[in-house]
Amino acid sequence: MLFRNRRAERIATLEEYRESGGYEALARVLQENRPRDISKIIDASGLRGRGGAGFPCAKKWMAVPEDGAFPRYVAVNADEMEPGTFKDRVLIHADPHAVLEGLALAGFAISAEKGYIFVRPSYENCARILEREVERAREAGLLGGNILGSDFSFDVIVHRSGGRYICGEASALLKALMGRRPNPVKAPPFPTDKGLWDRPTLVNNVETLANVPPIVRNGPEWFRGLARTPTGSGTKLYCVSGRVNRPGCYELPMGTPLSEIIEEHAGGLPEGRRFKACLPGGASTRFMGSEHYHIEMDFDPLAAVGHRLGTAAIMVFDDRTCLVAVTLNLMEFFARESCGWCTPCREGVPYVRDLLWRIEHGEGREEYIPQLREMCRHLWNAYCAFAPGAASPVESLLTFFEDEVREHISRKRCPFRG
Amino acid sequence: MLPEDLLESLRKRVAGSDHPRELLIDVLLELQGHCGYVNDEAMEAACELFDMTPLEIDELATFYDFIYREPVGKHVIHVCDSAICWMNGYASVLDHLTARLGIRFGETTSDGLFTLLPACCIGYCDRSPAMMVNRKVYGELTPEKIDRILEKCRNGRRPDDMDETER
């Protein structure tokens, strides 16, 4: 569905997108519907946000008060800095107008007049593609003033980020867009009440918005029927990386089993390697061991066993990869990217990294294990979701792979190093 | 001295925006493109353009990874050191770059051509190990490929042209 126009060698053009049914949804909606109708269709489809949190998309849209202030905005989160995640990049390179049409429909649903696409620096290609295609859409009357002759006007601006992981957090993203220091702020007020310049603002992920046009065109029942799980809906862009033969981004029915994604699509593990664990949804999720190797990769089945789908960025680790070292690498990332605003995160994450460094380098002690557990609990006192996300791999390492950690301590070295 | 036509075009952009500060990062990047990094003169220009204090702008400029407040080389190399690249050969990429350029992270070659910096996951985990040179990403790095990229830079080309196959 999302990858129907994906080609190996180039980006789908506006014409190709339209030939495959693109912009039909927008054209029909502008003639036949009122803004609230769109939210109702999306609500019935069960579409959940694809940026990591899995929040019901329509619930967010309907949170914009009907009598709220104008002008209103839609911000597209194309920051995608969660380690292991690259689906938005692939999607924009495959079919950029899927995102633009979804954005225009979201704009119509909340009566917004402007959309911002927030793009990270390493996605400069994406920024240029989007700028070019926005211009083409304007020329075709699909964006800009009086779209397709209707009284709906909606324009799109591509905003380049200066580059920091925290900008992917919705409130931080909005501050970054406004040229303010992007440390997160706590709701309320929610962006849907007071977002950009205190006006109602939606923040949606790239993949989430790309799902909107096909839902409007084909109906919510069709969308629900795409999933392999009874409570799921649609398809999902799964990014598979790490110890697999064919790392890549695969669009599959929501709820496709992990084992099937890894073996049939990502080509399985290299000869002689055995699956040990994966991070199922990026660096901010918990390590998931082989006991869940056949789990259906969807929000609810993962939540039922205490895991999170996150961005569905599946990072695969094999039996010869040291998970203490992996976790240490992730903590280096989180320590560097912490925005520094609140103490639990600014001080706690480097503390955790330091203890892990000592364990990995043969300087670990027994008492570090309870200390790490305690620090992980403290990280939950942080101001935003960053530090609890950082705690997830550490806490799960200690829960599911405590023996591996203890072996580092008792042997005074990393058992995976020769 | 910053050229007057650059300042004039920036003034026009800022004046044409309902919310000028949304352009702050764009303007800093543009000044950086001209000066190589955001030097104090560029800072002062930004202060004037946005009617902000140096402190207000510096707290933004120093926050971001791709705005440089110190001199950098003509080509800035950001090597991804996050989990997947780390698993797939980051260490040998860094070793090779360090040996070829004779610099460590945070340093610039004496000819002013290259600066070496780490980068958090750049979103090319399917093509790891990866690095960015200026704004362009290179994946599936091998020593030979790295040498070719460095050679291209040395020949005076800024390898930041868009290439749709590098997705």
Image (tube, rainbow, N blue to C red):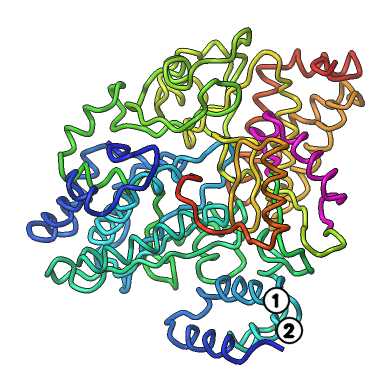
Residue A401 drawn at (x, y percent): 70, 17
Q: Is residue A182 left or right of residue A327?
A: left
Q: Position of residue B56 (x, y in %)?
A: 67, 77
Front-most of A338 and B120? B120
Q: Earlier in the sequence, mark 1 or mark 2?
A: 1
Q: Which residue is mark 2?
A: B41
Tell me which segment is drawn in magenta: B80-107
C-alpha distance separating marks 1 and 2: 9 Å
What number is the disc on residue B35?
1
Disc 1 element = helix
As shown in the figure, which amino acid type bears the numbered disc 1? Answer: Cys
A153 or A72: nearer the eye?
A: A153
Above or below, comparing residue A59 to residue A29 in the picture: above
Q: Residue furthest left?
A: A32
Q: Quadrant of residue B35?
A: bottom right
Q: Secondary structure at mark 2?
A: helix
* Residue A111, position as x, y percentages in the image: 25, 65
Residue under the point 82% across and 13% down: A407
Q: Select label 1 or label 2 by which is in front.
A: 1
Q: Is residue A117 left or right of residue A282?
A: left
User: What residue is drawn where x is 23% and y is 71%?
Assistant: A153
Q: Locate the N terminus of chain B and report the quarter of the image it occupies.
A: bottom right
